[in-house]
Image: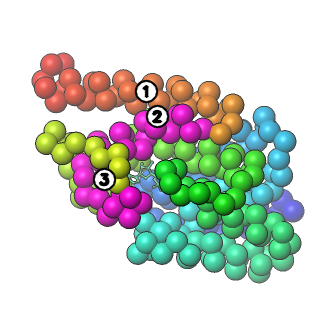
Amino acid sequence: MNNLIDITKTFVKAQLAQAEGGHDWFHIERVYNNAMLIAKGEACNLEVVQLGALLHDIADSKFHDGDETVGPSMAWQFLAAQNVPEETIIHVVNIIENISFKGGNHEMKFHSIELDIVQDADRLDALGAIGIARTFNYGGFKNRALYDPSIPPNLNMTKEEYKATTAPTLNHFYEKLLLLKDRMNTPTGKTIAEGRHQYMVDFLEQFYAEWEGEK
Ligand code: ADP
Ligand code: NI
């Protein structure tokens, strides 16, 4: 079935050819590699992890008018066309549908170790130096200010408000990125997240010092 993974890589690469820099094929490749690393420490179905990692951002709703059904149905069609067993397809689609779960009052309907692994792998790519780069790239893509001291972070936004926000990019660190290390699922994910978290804390300290002209 290795062939299926190669075919999936080719499909995803083509799908993401025009993607924003933080959600492009290289993001998928990093998440895939993170997922493979985390999977080594867990008893899991590796093929489901691989397919979930490769297909998790195939049609991110952020870039499809908020439509959260495009990605899952595209993945379903692709996997069905490759004659993948329905049980595997259902699991992979469940991963895609639940990976972005933001916590709060929504009840999560699906759980599996394979989802935990892919979610950790995706979250790791939101942290550290790459996380910082992706965040400012996305802010630039949305033409947002880097920072504005008069607009504080808002930790109580609904999912819809969060998607529609025009707040400065630095707010995203407080609204999401700095919260991720305490939400990691796996021991490997937690360990790597700690180091990347500290790197962002140091970055923010330096940022404010430079903002004030102190350094
Ligand atoms: P997930 O797929 O886990 O829901 P997202 O796709 O929302 O994560 O975010 C992935 C990355 O895109 C973030 O880590 C960040 O770098 C960037 N990003 C998403 N939303 C914002 C935002 N409002 N401001 C700045 N960057 C953002
Ligand atoms: Ni992703």
Q: Which residue is mark 1?
A: 199
The secondary element bearing badge 1 is classed as helix
- Ligand 1 has an atom within 8 Å of the beta carbon of the residue at disc 1: no
Q: Quick check: can you spot residue 127?
A: yes
**What type is the residue that disc 2 sits on?**
Gly
Using the numbered discs, state the Cα–Cα distance from disc 3 to disc 1 in whole angstroms. Answer: 20 Å
Query: Residue 105: x, y in percent?
Result: 50, 54
Disc 2 and disc 1 in contact, CB within 8 angstroms: yes
When asked about the image quadrant of residue 81, the answer is bottom right
The secondary element bearing badge 2 is classed as helix
- Which quadrant would the C terminus be assigned to in this image? top left
Bounds of the magenta segment: 158-184
Q: Is residue 199 left or right of residue 103?
A: left
Query: Residue 16: x, y in percent?
Result: 53, 67
Q: Is residue 151 left or right of residue 177?
A: left
Q: Nearer the viewer, residue 19 or 181?
A: 181
Q: Quick check: can you spot residue 17?
A: no
Disc 2 and disc 3 in contact, CB within 8 angstroms: no
Using the numbered discs, state the Cα–Cα distance from disc 2 to disc 3 in whole angstroms. Answer: 17 Å
Q: Which residue is mark 2?
A: 128
**What type is the residue that disc 1 sits on?**
Tyr
- Is 131 rendered above or below residue 75? above
- Dominant secondary structure (helix, strand or loop) of the stretch shown in magenta: helix
Q: Which residue is mark 3?
A: 139
Q: Residue at x 25, y 52 (%)?
A: 167
